[in-house]
Image (cartoon, grey):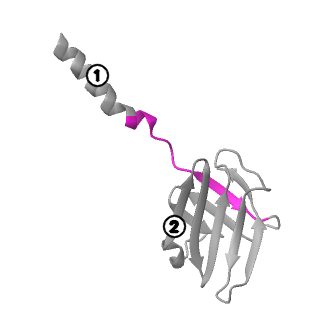
Amino acid sequence: MKKMKNLVLLFTLLSTPVLAAKSPLKVKCSTPRSNVVIKINGDKLSLDGRFPAETVAQRTKLNGPAITKIFFVGGEKHTIHLNNKNSFSELEDFVNIRSRKGHEMTFPLNCKKY
């Protein structure tokens, strides 16, 4: 009987991470004029409907509910920051684009899950 309880406990502990696994983040973001559309699907990222080769080298920073993704396209550094991946806000979510010469442009993002 004691072995049975131990087996049930072991099975419960081992299966808990599988049950608690979350689906990947699937977000579509655009700037107010919709001249830049960014899709995030877990670790994959597409810009304007294509997967540029330069975006392979990307970094992701997680800080509680916030997420920041950094990638390079055409020599420009793009930083996407979502302040709360569960509740989006144009005031707190943005994309920052920095050129090779150091010029920076920051645009608010309108994001929604898809």
Above or below for 61 versus 8: below
Residue 73 bears which disc, if any? none
Give the left or right position of residue 66, taking residue 20 as reference: right
Name the secondary structure under disc 1.
helix
Indicate the amino acid at tag 2: Arg
Above or below for 1 versus 58: above
Q: Residue furthest bottom?
A: 101
Tell me if residue 68 is in the magenta stretch. Answer: no
**Residue sitting at 70 percent across and 45 percent down?**
87
Q: Residue furthest front?
A: 63
**Residue sitting at 73 percent across and 79 percent down?**
104
Instruction: Give the x, y percent position of residue 75.
Output: 60, 85
Which of the two discs, 1 and 2, labels the residue nearer the N terminus? 1
Name the secondary structure under disc 2.
strand
Quarter holding residue 32: bottom right
Is the residue marked by circle 2 packed among few (<14), some (14-19), or many (20+) residues within 10 Å? few
Quarter holding residue 69: bottom right
**Residue sitting at 55 percent across and 76 percent down?**
52
Instruction: Give the x, y percent position of residue 58.
Output: 51, 70
Residue hosting label 2: 59
Above or below for 11 versus 106: above
Q: Tell me which segment is drawn in magenta.
A: 17-31
Residue hosting label 1: 9
**Residue sitting at 60 percent across and 61 percent down?**
68
Indicate the amino acid at tag 1: Leu
Quarter holding residue 6: top left
Locate the N terminus and report the quarter of the image it occupies. top left
Instruction: Give the x, y percent position of residue 105.
Output: 75, 76
